[in-house]
Image (cartoon, helix red, strand yellow):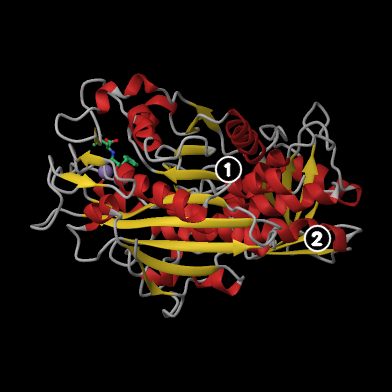
Amino acid sequence: MVSVCLIAWSPTPTKIDAAVLSVRFAPFTKSPEALAVGLRPGPLLQPRALAAEPLVSRALAGRHSFKAEEEDVLPVLTAEGWLVLVGLDADDEDEGACRWRRIGGALFGELADSGIVRLDVALDLPVQALAEIAFGMSLRSWRAPSLYRSKPDPDEVWTLAEAVFVTEDPASAQSCFDRLAGLAAATALARDLVVAPGNRLTPASFITFLAPLVALGVSITEVKPDELGLLEAVGQGSAIPARLLVLSWQGGQKGAPPMLFVGKGITFDSGGLDIKDEEDMDEMKGDMAGAAAVAGALYAIAARRAAANVVGLLALAENMPSGRAMRPGDVVRSFSGLSVEILDTDAEGRLALADALAYGAKIYQPALMVDLATLTGAVEVTLGRHLAGLFSADDDLAEKLLAAGEDEDEGLWRLPLTDHYDEALKSAIADLRNCQWEEGPDALHAARFLQHFVPAGLPWAHLDIAGVSLLEEDGPLAKEGPTGFGVRLLDRLVARYLER
Ligand code: BES
Ligand code: MN
Ligand code: ZN
């Protein structure tokens, strides 16, 4: 087997404007432009910052609709400046970080384009809670980069640029926040990749978007291995050939088997010759959200210098119709040796992933493998837009992923992975076919197809993130658009395995 290494980092980086809110912690605040204070729900709303009490009572006079429930935010213009009332629910000792993040997200969402530039936050909460609120604000502050416009769109410019959290212990609040700041930047990177247009982010230019990882010590190599027949077939209709990017963070014991994360990186999915309907085809520039999540996770892991060996494999290709494109009915030899009949060229993600999984398992001998992919429209029909599909034959890995998803509010739901689905994947001419039409929605067959390319005994999980990679309307931690789903989840998975 010959692996041709094309590049080990040399391209000119693609520059993206830093889109994340600036956060500070300080012991006190003087005549702020805008001050956020917390309130409890109940018949008598109780302000937490006593100094602000008279101000709060005056601001609240006559505003009966404000119930101070969690995620309620009410900005009030007073003679002294903006007072921002923030609803807080029952008890501060609640361990769940996610509720604080959602409060932060709601706060940013409400004030993003309010005209307020600097917000001082006086919430009188434990430092961990303050750091999580700051994290939620940071996540919600992402917007599409302006590099694709000649001048910034005034509707997309946030006025709110800085949050200063008042605390008696700024140093420990800052150290709680440091790790989260890395995770916010990692999520922003993943979202930047998902919104990048298909003509800008291609299998060839993808590496130029990853300069921030290199700056953190992640090594990146671009390989065009022979014998990845399926990946090559997916890209062969495009003028830009398919390839693999290998991202490697070696923070653990030398020689210890890595955790391997594999991402579907179809930079544009037209469907190929079995072309998609025009409706929503533009969304298919985001068919690399799995690869984006893997890149983001490596950023986060490197940013906190995790004591782990982690390898990310990005399976990059553009699925296009042309005179050189793969045809329905073609039979292609995979890296693993199995031959595959390509029944439908729009079921391309599983082809690209099948080769990446088999290659990754063989070359890196990982301790475990997790792939993320916008693989099927069917998973959205099954689980909706809140949960991603989890497929794994390894209960331990599945449980760790489910727990990580719960911790991070990136929910997963386990779906079946069994040999019931093999009958429908039988081909009349080859070892397997890439999809079936007889049994309807097809996330389960897609997962089972992938399993044929994973060595038995290697802990492996497949996450179908097609339903959760984009939001159709503003959510608590992201505006309408890409979510960066998977970055926090994978970061937490690494922590669960290595940093107990
Ligand atoms: N990238 C799509 C899946 C997808 C659909 C992601 C909608 C996000 C939103 C994938 O490559 C695809 O086309 N899947 C087909 C498979 C079918 C042809 C067997 C599908 O799900 O319809
Ligand atoms: Mn497709
Ligand atoms: Zn696709």
Q: Earlier along the polypeptide chain: callout 1 or callout 2? A: 2
Dot 2 corresponds to which residue? 175
| Three-letter residue code for mark 1 | Pro
Dot 1 corresponds to which residue? 476
On the rendered structure, is 331 left or right of 73?
left
- CB atoms of marks 1 and 2 within 8 Å: no
Whether 305 is drawn above or below 418: the answer is below
Point 42% across, 47% down: residue:
357
Point 52% across, 35% down: residue:
457
Residues 46 and 232: in front is: 232
- How many labels, in total? 2
| Three-letter residue code for mark 2 | Ser
* Quadrant of the rendered image containing residue 145: bottom left
* Cα–Cα gap, marks 1 and 2: 24 Å
On the rendered structure, is 477 left or right of 67?
left
Q: Nearer the viewer, mark 1 or mark 2?
A: 2
* Quadrant of the rendered image containing residue 354: top left
